[in-house]
Image (cartoon, rainbow, N blue to C red):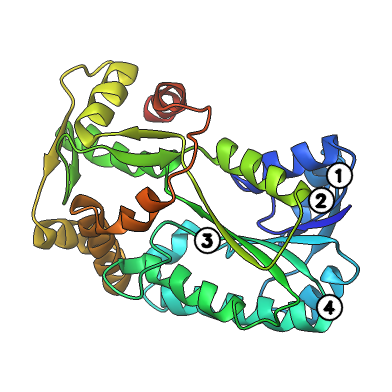
Amino acid sequence: MKIIVTGSLGNISKPLTKELAGRGHSVTVISRSSERQPEIEALGAKAAIGSMEDVDFLAETFKGADVVYAMEALNASVFFDHTIDFIEANIQIARNYKEAFERSGVKNIVHLSSIGAHMSEGNGILRSHYNVEKILNELPDDVSIKFMRPVGFYYNMFSFIPTIKSQGLIIQNYGGDQKEPWVSPLDIASTIAEEIEKPFSGREIRYIASEEISPNEIAQTLGEAIGKTDLKWLTVSDEDLLKGMVNAGMNPKTAKGFVEMNAARGNSILYEDYYLHKPVLGKVKLKEFAKEFAAAYHQ
C-alpha cells in the first residue's frame, strides 16, 4: 500500500515508518525539516518536506494514498510559548487535515487521538482531541477513520526529572495506590501498523495501553532505576501545581489545562470510557522504560 505518515521521525512515527517499510509498503513521511530526509530515506521511506499549516502541500502529498496516518505534531516548546493557544493550534491543524483529505480524495485515515477524547470538558488540554475528532467526523461517510486513543505516554515521565533532582520527589496533583494506564510509543506504533493493514469500515475507536500501574509503584520503579530507592510521589493541591508550572515559565492557560487533566486522572473521570473499552495491554512495561529514564536522569 501507499501510506503517508505524519509526525516526521518522532517517538511514534519513526518506529511506525520502520515497521511499515519493513513490511514492503511504500511509505512517505511528512517532515517540516529537510535535515530529516537522509534519516527518513535510510528507513526505506520517502520524505515530503512541508508543514501541517500548508493545506496545498498536504493535499498534494495525500493524493493517491491508500492510508494516511495523521497526528497533530506540536513541539513541546509550545507549552512555554505565551503567544500560542495549544488547543486552538491543534484545532487549526485538524481543519487543515480535513480540507486536505477532502481535496485529495483520501478514503482511509488512522488518526492519533488520545485518552479523554470522549470528554467535551473536564479533561484540560486533552479537550483538543475531542475537538479534533469532532472536526474529522464531519468528513463524508465514505471516508473511514480509525481513532487511536493511547493513554499517558511513558516518556511524559521525563518531566519528573527536574523535581526529582531539586527536591528528591515526584510532584503532581494526584497520586496514591490507584492504578492508571500508561503506554509506550512502541506499542502505539505496533498497534497503528496493525490497524493500517486491517480492513477499514466507517468510524472506529481503539484504546492503546501498555501497563496499569499506580503513582506509588511508578515512584518505586523509577527510584530503583536511578539509584534513589526512597523516591516518593508527593500529591499537592491543584493551586500549588499550577503555581509551580507557571513559575517554571509555562503558558498559564496551558498549565491550567495540565492541572485539570491530572485532576481528571486522579478522580478517574478521564478513564471512564477506557474501562468500558479496555484494550489488551501491550508488551513494553514500565521497568523497560525505566532504563531509558535512568539514562536521561544521569546525563
SS at mark 1 in the image: helix
Name the residue tied to disc 1.
41
Q: Earlier in the sequence, mark 4 or mark 1?
A: 1
Closer to the camera: disc 3 or disc 1? 3
- Is 228 positioned to the left or the right of 71 in the image? left
Closer to the camera: disc 2 or disc 4? 4
SS at mark 2 in the image: helix
Relative to residue 187, is residue 114 depicted above or below? Answer: below
SS at mark 3 in the image: loop
Q: Residue at x 50, y 36 (%)?
A: 280
Mark 1 burial class by Cα count in 10 Å: few <14, some 14-19, many 20+: some
Mark 2 burial class by Cα count in 10 Å: few <14, some 14-19, many 20+: many
Name the residue tied to disc 2.
37
Q: Amino acid at mark 3?
A: Ser
Q: CA distance from mark 2 to mark 1?
A: 6 Å
Mark 3 burial class by Cα count in 10 Å: few <14, some 14-19, many 20+: many
In-front residue for pair 220/107: 107
- Is 174 positioned to the left or the right of 288 in the image? left
Q: Amino acid at mark 1?
A: Glu
Q: Position of residue 67 (x, y in %)?
A: 79, 60
Q: CA distance from mark 2 to mark 4?
A: 23 Å
| Quarter of the image with the C terminus in it | top left
Q: Amino acid at mark 4?
A: Ser
Q: Residue at x 44, y 51 (%)?
A: 277
Q: Position of residue 167 (x, y in %)?
A: 15, 36
Closer to the camera: disc 4 or disc 1? 4
Relative to residue 42, is residue 285 depicted above or below? Answer: above
Closer to the camera: disc 2 or disc 3? 3
In-front residue for pair 284/227: 284
Name the residue tied to disc 4.
104
Q: CA distance from mark 3 to mark 4?
A: 22 Å
